[in-house]
Image (spheres, helix red, strand yellow):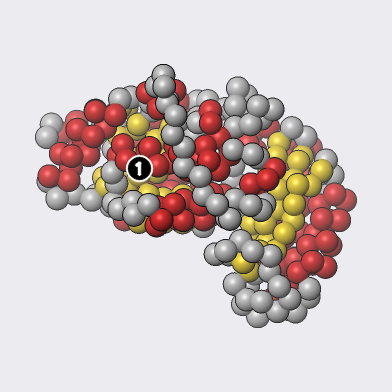
Amino acid sequence: MASSENDTLVTVRDVDGLRHRVRSWKKAGLSVALVPTMGALHRGHAVLMERAGAMADRVVATIFVNPTQFGPSEDFNAYPRHEARDFEMLEQAGVHVLFAPSAATMYPPGFATSVRVARLTDALCGPLRPGHFEGVATVVTKLLLQAQPDIALFGDKDFQQLAVIKRFTADLNVPVDIIGVPTVREADGLAMSSRNAYLTADERAKAPALFGAITRAAEKIAAGENPLAATAEAKATIMAAGYRSIDYVDARHAETLAQLGPTEKGGRVFAAAHLGRARLIDNVEVPLA
Ligand code: PAF
């Protein structure tokens, strides 16, 4: 293999080019990690890339703003796109290949297949974003089949997405280990997200209230408070902080995503709320009492 294929970040836009590189790494006995993204990369993504580099010999990052996971009134057109800046960040993070396919490569004319995961998508973001998880599961299935990595890494911030990906890869016997990586936060607790770019300075100052409220709710649940009461208090706190509206604040079991019963262990508190034009989501573990 030429040294440029080993050491220097290259951008690949077609599936054959990606497969050629991955095949030659595997022939040389090297392990491969995949980190799918939609670009507009931030430090949370850099942490994913670095973790991938610590766990595998070669790292493939993908950037594809996937149209099928956006609803008709969502922010597909406005979604931030900065491929040149992203490339520099991936280079610094030691990534080997950036796979950045076009929409026509991912969804050629006649495309008619989708992957739908039941039950886990019945709650939280599922009913509020019809088709979203089907779009995510379909594109991640394609990326996994295109790159055929040994491991793939995703952030805990999109915890329901991670649960969906773990479910379909297990159900469909996709030969990959799915690794969840803890949410990376700003100093004031706000979860890093590409959509934080939508916040004005005033909104940015209010934004950490979401994390604060769900953290307090999780602590109260751990101390024995009824999850419904704790999440109701969190909703009031979030609205008082200046959020425009709340989609949900909900305590659920981390694996099944079923409602968390009083005194039940293994919970997480999930929230989605609107601040200005941003829809922010976050989740935290209920600590063990
Ligand atoms: O989390 C994301 O950025 C996207 O949902 C993903 C996993 C890259 C699929 O488009």
Whether residue 183 is visible, yes or no, is no
Residue 223's place in the image compared with 91, above or below, is below
> Residue at coordinates 71% horizontally, 36% vertically from top-left?
278
Pick whichever, 93 or 261, lies toward us: 261
Pick whichever, 267 or 275, lies toward us: 267
Quarter of the image where the C terminus is located: bottom right
Pick whichever, 85 or 14, lies toward us: 14
Where disc 1 sits, the SS reads: helix
> Residue at coordinates 50% horizontally, 29% vertically from top-left?
65
Which three-letter amino acid code belongs to the residue tagged 1?
A: Leu
Residue 183's place in the image compared with 253, above or below, is above
The image shows residue 29 at horizontal and vertical percentages of 14, 50
> Residue at coordinates 68% horizontally, 45% vertically from top-left?
127
Side of 182 relative to 50 (left or right): right
Quarter of image, res 230:
bottom right
How crowded pointer 1 is (Cα within 10 Å; few <14, some 14-19, many 20+) is rated as many
Q: Which residue is mark 1?
A: 144
Whether residue 126 is visible, yes or no, is yes
The reply to whether the residue tagged 1 has its Cβ within 8 angstroms of ligand 1 is no
Quarter of image, res 273:
top right
The image shows residue 260 at horizontal and vertical percentages of 68, 69
Quarter of image, res 80:
top right
The image shows residue 225 at horizontal and vertical percentages of 78, 75
Quarter of the image where the N terminus is located: top left
> Residue at coordinates 80% horizontally, 59% vertically from top-left?
234
The image shows residue 164 at horizontal and vertical percentages of 51, 52
